[in-house]
Image (cartoon, rainbow, N blue to C red):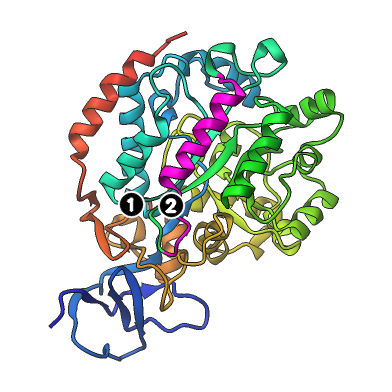
Amino acid sequence: MSSKRLWLKRPLAVLAQEGQDASGGIVVEDGRITELVGHGGVPSGDHVTFDASEHVVLPGLINTHHHFFQTVTRAHPEALDKELFDWLKALYPVWAKLGPDAFRLATRLALAELMMSGVTCTSDHQYLFTDGIEDAMDVQAEESAALGMRMVLNRGSMNLSQRDGGLPPDAVVQDMDTILADCERVIGRYHDPSDGAMLQVALAPCSPFSVTSELMRETAALAGRCGCALHTHLAESEDENAFCQEKFGFRPLDYLEENGWLGPKTWVAHGIHFNDGEIARMGRAGTSVCHCPTSNMVLASGICRTRDMETAGVSVGLGVDGSASNDSSNLMETVRHALMVNRLRYGTTVSHKNVLRWATEGSAACLGRTDIGAIAPGRQADLALFKLDELRFSGAHDPIAALVLCGAHRADRVMIKGRWTIENGLPTDVDVERLRHEHGAIARKFAGAQ
């Protein structure tokens, strides 16, 4: 009997790709889903068995926007009860003090926390390269490999400081030549465009108020030559819209198009303040949006027009966003928030199935990937398994709906590329207690730091 062929036997429920019956289970071999077993069936060929009868099985969740380094400044007293621009101004000086030890622990903690919530692939928008963390992309590659997490490294950038009319202080920006040289280095070292890749690279200038138009254009050109995706914050707040109108003479989406970014290889974070015409343009261009409901609510930024976007042909994914504007790195929690806030705008036409699709297939589309995001033969074996054995689930009748409506927040097991990375709710390759102690100790150095 081959030890490589595993049958996840008769789960309590499975969120399989539409039209697929996986009620009898899922067969995994060599990192892929090779067979879905129908009701009452058994797999073909030899196999070993994992009893999944107490588990609800989802495709591995995909997080398409985050800032790992911000885990050391959660609920920071200088940033409480502020909207985006004032919040950033309060935290930039604190983040300027980030060193290599703090950055590594922040990255490790964010990855572990995401994985514990059912995430199997994450994208991190790392735009801070202060003294001592110039090798941030290498650290993230090392840490994601150590945990077994699938990841898109977003080589972010900021080169427009307060001195030149931008928002960030001088201490947290780099010059354009340094940025582009490191972008090329990171792509050459880490970008794997192949099916099943564990590491890919996207280029990600931070925002219209922190980068120059020249950097936006040069980054788009480099990404085009190297086949990489593009990512940035866009239309997150009314302040950003006003900044773009004053500095560039047009709105954020016009700024994006003017600099060669509007296309199918681009996904943007937030996308709250688009008008009808802009949403239609994005749909025609194939540009995607990462919806960040938790952060949007914390910063009072507004509600993303998700259903209008989908109607226009825009793919919608989900992201937790930074751990200082979300104060958590839990994508299952974000899924629930997405349901609630979108019902305020669209009513009960938004269901648990919609928001779970955003966190899986929609997020995969944002990243330009067709090998993850669904439970179907041939897809990567990235799975999140949840139990319904907590008091919060008692009395729940629809197991998949219960995960969202009753507030699931922790996976019992997670599989990435056919390997268990979470067992009994804990990472297989991380000492969580030690990590909590070390991260907490270093985070205390940032309390009140200005």
285 on left or right of 100: right
Q: Is residue 346 visible?
A: yes
Determine the CA span between mark 1 and mark 2.
8 Å
In x, y percent, where is residue 299? Answer: 60, 31
* Residue 153 can be seen in this image: no
Is the magenta region chiefly helix, strand or loop?
helix
Above or below, 339 relative to 159: below
Q: Is residue 37 left or right of residue 163?
A: left
Specify which label sits upstream in the sequence, 1 or 2: 2
Identify the amino acid type marked 2. Answer: Met
Numbered disc 2: secondary structure: helix
Q: Position of residue 64 (x, y in %)?
A: 52, 48
Q: Quadrant of the N terminus?
A: bottom left
Q: SS at mark 1? A: loop
Q: Residue furthest left?
A: 1
- Please tell me the numbered disc located at residue 332: 2
- Which residue range is magenta in the image? 173-195
Decide whether residue 275 is among the magenta residues: no
Q: What x and y, as percent, mark residue 83?
A: 63, 25
Instruction: Name the residue carrying label 1.
Output: 410
Q: Nearer the viewer, residue 281 or 403?
A: 281
Front residue of this view, candidates 398 and 19 = 19
Q: Residues within 10 Å of mark 1 (few under 14, many from 20)?
A: many
Q: Position of residue 119 (x, y in %)?
A: 39, 53
Q: Residue at x 49, y 32 (%)?
A: 182
Above/below status of 308 relative to 64: below
Side of 286 relative to 148 (left or right): right
Dots 1, 2 in contact, CB < 8 A: yes
For the residue marked with disc 1, what is the amino acid? Arg
